[in-house]
Amino acid sequence: MVYLTRKAEFSASHYYNNPQLTPEENHRIFGKCNNPNGHGHNYTLEVTVKGEINPQSGFVVDLKQLKEVMQKEVLDAMDHRFLNKEVPEFTSRTPTTENIAIAIWQRLQPRLNAATLHRVRVYETPDLFVDFYGEA
Amino acid sequence: MKAHLTRRYLFSASHRLHSKALSDEENRATYGKCNNPFGHGHNYHLEVTVSGPVDAQTGMVCNLVDLDNLVAREILDRFDHQNLNMLKEFTVSVPTTENLCRQIYDILQRRFRHAHLDRVRLEETLMNSFEYDGEGTHSLIL
C-alpha cells in the first residue's frame, strides 16, 4: 500500500454563527469569528489517497485526474468565495475547519474511483489544521 | 463524525543532556555536544492533536480558546524561556526532547477535558521531531 498526497491552496471568507443560538451565545462561543461581515484565510488542502501501485503505469492514482477532481469539486466551489453564502453545505452547517474537511471529503470520495481516499487535511493557518479520515 | 484537530505552539528553552547515572566520559560519549556543561537552547515547535465528534451545534471538535488557554497556562508558562534542567520536572530525568514530549503529553492528558488527546509532537529543530501518543510505560528515561 502506497500513500500519495496532493496539495492545493484556496482563499475564502467565512464567519461562525449558529442561528439556533442567541447573539450573546454565538459571541461567547465563537468570539471574533462571529463577526457577521466575515474574515478570510488562505487554506491549504492536503488530499491523501492510498492504493497499490499499478504495475503498468507505476502510479497509485493518475495525478492529473486527482488534480482535476480537486479543482472541480473544491477549488472551483470554494476558492475566492464567502463559504457561508456560496457553498451549499454551509447554509446549514457552520464552516469551521472541521466541517470544511468533512465537506471536502464528501465531495471527493464519490469521485475517486482509482484510489481510496485516506485523509483530508485542511490548514486554516500554518498553526491550525484538521484531519478527517471518514470516521463516523 | 470524528475529526482530528492539530494546533501548533512555539516556546524557547535551554537544556543540557547529562545523566547522573553515567560517568562524565559516558555522558560525553552518549550526548556529544548536547553535554556541554553550560547548556544550549532551542526553539521548540509543539503540535497538540485532539480528536472527537464534531459538535452539531458549534461545528467544532472543541473550542480552541479552551485548548489555547490550557497550553498557555500549563505548558508555555512553565517551559518558555526556562532552563529545563532547573525545573522540578527534570530533577531526576534528563530533559531530552523525548522526555519533554512525554511530560507535555502527561500534563495535557491529566487536564484537558474537552476532547480526546491523540498525540503530542515536538520539533526540537527543523531536522528533529518526536511524537508521543501515550503508548507504553510512563517511566521517564533517567
Image (cartoon, rainbow, N blue to C red):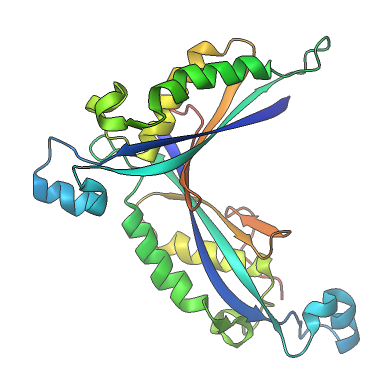
B64 relative to A67, above or below: below
Quadrant, the C terminus of chain B: bottom right
Which residue sits at x=65%, y=82%?
B92
A80 relative to B132, above or below: above
The residue positioned farthest toward the front in the image shown: A80
The x, y position of residue B65, in whole percent, is 32, 58
The x, y position of residue B110, in whole percent, is 43, 63
A29 relative to A73, above or below: below
Q: Across the whole image, how many numbered discs are drawn on residues?
A: 0
Q: Can residue B54 be seen at all in this image of the molecule?
A: no
The x, y position of residue A47, in whole percent, is 57, 29
The x, y position of residue B2, in whole percent, is 42, 35
Q: Is residue A51 left or right of residue A66?
A: right
Which residue sits at x=63%, y=55%?
B131
* Camera-nearest residue between B84 and B141: B84
Which residue sits at x=48%, y=77%?
B78
Q: Is residue B52 left or right of residue B103?
A: left
Q: Is residue B121 left or right of residue B116?
A: right
Asked which quadrant contains residue A103, the reply is: top left
Q: Can residue A60 be seen at all in this image of the molecule?
A: yes
Which residue sits at x=90%, y=78%?
B29
B101 relative to B23, above or below: above
Quadrant, the N terminus of chain B: top left
Asked which quadrant contains residue B36, the reply is: bottom right
